């Protein structure tokens, strides 16, 4: 029994150390830059600058399946699945368009220009310059799933309508954490205005 308690204690301590490491590494990760224009009770308005992304379009077979497929394709590219076997730093958030087909995007680090990027081994990966834009964003914690994303999309629409703010039909999900991170999880639904 003592061995079991010691083993559980060691596993718990290892888990806590790994989570602390993940939180610290997340704080050093380059993120999609924006300026907050105005904060409301449940959402905020932001301006994003023009930014380069790697992207892949996958069939929308639900958040879990589509995000897993898109992530593995793009992660393969940035972890060396390219003509130079070059690794590219991970950035945050991972962006997913909320349409019939999902486009998953990883931001390219600012110090890398499009002409400097190695050619992907997977031909379905594209480079996409997202223009500067104004968006509304609503945040939620925990793990994302289809129901939560749809719930917060509807909450954002209702909040914008209540404030008389017009919005487009271009909604996105932003996920900021790796799936194995347990604490301080951050997700957002945004819409272009």
Image (cartoon, rainbow, N blue to C red):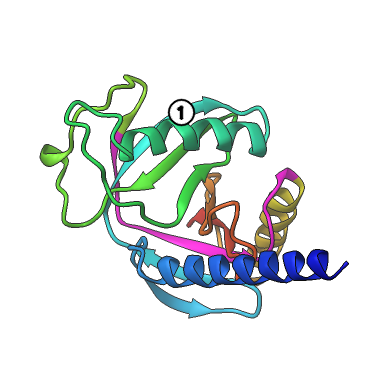
Q: Is residue 105 left or right of residue 65?
A: left
Q: Residue at x 48, y 69 (%)?
A: 21
Residue 125 in the image: state x and y as whole percent.
Answer: 34, 28
Query: Is residue 143 rendered magenta in the image?
Result: yes
Residue 72, relative to residue 169: is it above or below? above
Q: Residue at x 16, y 41 (%)?
A: 114
Residue 79 in the image: state x and y as whole percent.
Answer: 33, 39
Query: Does residue 99 appear anywhere in the picture?
Result: no
Q: Is residue 10 left or right of residue 127?
A: right
Residue 155 in the image: state x and y as whole percent.
Answer: 72, 61
Numbered range of the magenta stretch: 127-146
Query: Does residue 67 appear anywhere in the picture?
Result: yes
Q: Is residue 129 left or right of residue 113?
A: right
Nearer to the camera, 138 or 123: 123
> Which residue lies most toward the left here?
115
Give the quarter of the image for residue 41.
bottom right
> Which residue lies most toward the front here?
2
Q: Which residue is drawn at 37% across and 66% down?
A: 47
Residue picked out by circle 1: 57
């Amino acid at each position: 029994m003592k061995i079991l308690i010691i083993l559980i204690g060691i596993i718990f301590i290892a888990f806590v150390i790994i989570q602390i490491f993940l939180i610290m590494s997340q704080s050093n990760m380059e993120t999609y830059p924006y300026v907050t224009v105005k904060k409301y009770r449940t959402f905020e308005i932001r301006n994003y600058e023009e930014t380069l992304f790697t992207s892949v379009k996958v069939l929308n077979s639900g958040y879990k399946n589509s995000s897993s497929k898109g992530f593995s394709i793009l992660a393969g590219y940035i972890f060396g699945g390219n003509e130079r076997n070059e690794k590219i730093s991970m950035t945050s958030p991972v962006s997913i368009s909320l349409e019939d087909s999902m486009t998953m995007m990883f931001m390219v680090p600012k110090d890398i220009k499009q002409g400097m990027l190695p050619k992907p081994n997977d031909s379905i990966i594209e480079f996409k310059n997202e223009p500067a834009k104004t968006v509304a964003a609503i945040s939620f914690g925990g793990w994302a799933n289809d129901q939560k994303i749809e719930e917060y999309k509807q909450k954002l629409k209702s909040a914008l309508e209540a404030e008389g703010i017009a919005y487009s039909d271009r909604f996105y999900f932003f996920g900021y954490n790796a799936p194995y991170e347990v604490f301080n999880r951050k997700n957002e639904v945004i819409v272009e205005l």
